Image: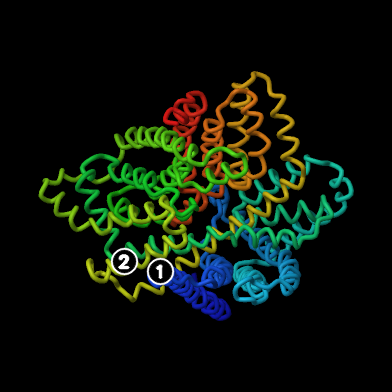
Amino acid sequence: MTLIGPERVLRVLAEWPAACLVLAEIGVLSAGVVSRYVLQSPLTWSDELASVLFLWLAMLGAVVAMQRNEHMRLTVFVAKLSPPTQVAVNTLVACLSVLFCAVLWWPAFEHMNEQWVILTPALEIPDALRVAAVVVGLSLMLLQSLLQLVRQARGAQLLLSLGILGVLGAALTLASPWLMNWGHLNLLIFFVALVGLCVVIGLPIAFAFALSTVAYLQFSTSTPLTIVVSRIDEGMSHLILLSVPLFVFLGAFIAVTGLAKAMVDFLATLLGHLRGGLQYVLLAAMYLVSGISGSKAADMAAVAPALFPEMKQRGAHPGRLVALLAASGAMSETIPPSLVLITIGAVTGVSISALFVGGLVPALVGLLALCAVVYWQAKTDNTVLVERAPMSQVLKCFWLALPALALPFVIRSAVVEGVATATEVSTIGILYTLVIGVLFYRQLDWRRLFPMLVETASLSGAILLIIGCATAMAWALTQSGFSRDLVALMTQVPGGATGFMLVSLVVFVLLGSMLEGIPAIVLFGPLLFPVARALGIHEVHYAMVVVFAMGLGLFAPPVGVGFYAACAIGKVDPDQALNPIWPYLGALLLALLVIAFVPWVSIGFL
């Protein structure tokens, strides 16, 4: 893509600060880790400063993602259109991108002004300095989207797009008095029809979520739009998400320092002679490291970059790899220490230790189901096969890979034993990788550092903006009263425990795709778990069903946020993974039915 002069300037204004923020984030958190564990004198301000920098990193990363066209979108339907129609649709998408930035800019500015009176506890600086990142990010994205529109739009298509948006806006404005009295029908209009339409024409997923939420609040409620920005801010600023860019960077870092190659070489000597051998390795790796960060996106980012390059070299289809990655994320949702399990224990009173024990076997059932699909697909794969390695080579590769193989065990042990938080552990992982890469493998190429930092910012921004906009949409659904009515409906389901369980499967798959795990659990856990107990369903058993179902929804296209996060991490367009993912999701659905109707899977070891 040829850049015009202003676009080059905007790229520099976004990429360099974003790269520096990634380094600053690593530096601040590393200082906190060294101070706490080495000097035994914790820095009270390190996490707070990291949180301030984090929102700036997320928003500038979202700008970089827009500049690099790396925001997650679905293009499979647009690609089937004729070239002139594609131009018209792309112009409409560009106009909607401008609209996304424009309608949120003033609410973001008002939100920033409201935060001036709030001081951070340790640094005692106005919180507005942190929230200003949203205003700056939206401003840069608005300029970028306008420049892109100018570069690609043609007169007729631009007038047509503006006419469509004008007619739609006028129709919604005129219908607003009636929409305010339509109740839950508005949810179908704005969160099903409008979101679906935006996704189909190729609008970035985050933009579709935000625009639909804004339209719902503007035309069917009297809620001020500043709430949208505050919820986006809340969703992107969750403390546990600090680990996302660090694990994204760690995934890239282990590739350039030689750790990834050492691990892949060893695993290839063990399983490389099998068809689908490295796919099995990917599944096992997700089972082992899942939950270490508290963020599924961070888990995938820690595993995929170490395995994908070698798997692609062996002829694996990129779309299928991302589909398997997404399915493995859904499979591993119940593996401790899962943040969703901890949340369930907190809001429902279920024993967290029991949840941790109960979560391993359900994930194993999902793992075996996915392995069966991999085995079946591998029979017809055209991947390159190699001869079985002799034992001497296996032992040699094991010795070389030992420092690399120790990394996931160090990370998981530190989190499970409560030695360090997920964010601290990701920092420790980066420091460990730096030392091992420099002293042991000696393959660190410093020239690749800046591109890695920019890629980390872009990927993190794309993922975090989706999470933020999904959080805003989840809040709107909650305020509509949808949750209360859903609970009332489920208490009247015929069929007793079996009927309740079947309805729970469907409901939580849908909720997982729209709300993600934690918001859905906080909303519905305290309401539905007592119903399950009254029907004789063991609370740990019900928790495993709920979490697995939400994981399935989270990674199921076309709405599931996790699916697009996996595509972003694998650097694959969602349309390439859309068809390959369905056999995996089908296998996980069968696993979910086993978990739901064979209670021993969840409570057999309690």
Read off the residue under disc 1.
452
Q: 57 or 48: which is nearer to us?
A: 48
Q: 433 or 108: which is nearer to us?
A: 433
Locate residue 109: give its quadrant: bottom right
Work out whether 203 lies above or below 345: below
Give the amino acid type for the residue marked by disc 2 in the picture: Val
Q: 194 or 429: which is nearer to us?
A: 429
- Drawn side of residue 541 relative to residue 97, left or right: left
Which residue is painted at 88% across and 45% down in the image?
178
Q: Residue furthest front?
A: 40
- Asked whether the viewer can see residue 67, the reply is no
Read off the residue under disc 2.
256
Which quarter of the rendering shows the C terminus?
top left
What's the distance in space between the residues labelled 1 and 2, CA to CA? 9 Å
Give the amino acid type for the residue marked by disc 1 in the picture: Met
Q: Earlier in the sequence, mark 1 or mark 2?
A: 2
Q: Position of residue 463 (x, y in %)?
A: 53, 58
Q: Secondary structure at mark 1?
A: helix
Which residue is painted at 52% across and 44% down in the image?
555
Question: Around disc 2, counting alpha carbons within 10 Å, would you say few (fewer than 14), some (14 to 19), or many (20 or more)?
Answer: many
Residue contact between numbered discs 1 and 2, judged by CB atoms under 8 Å:
yes
Q: Residue furthest right?
A: 177
How many numbered badges does the structure rendering display?
2
Q: Position of residue 230 (x, y in %)?
A: 70, 62
Q: Which mark is residue 266?
A: none
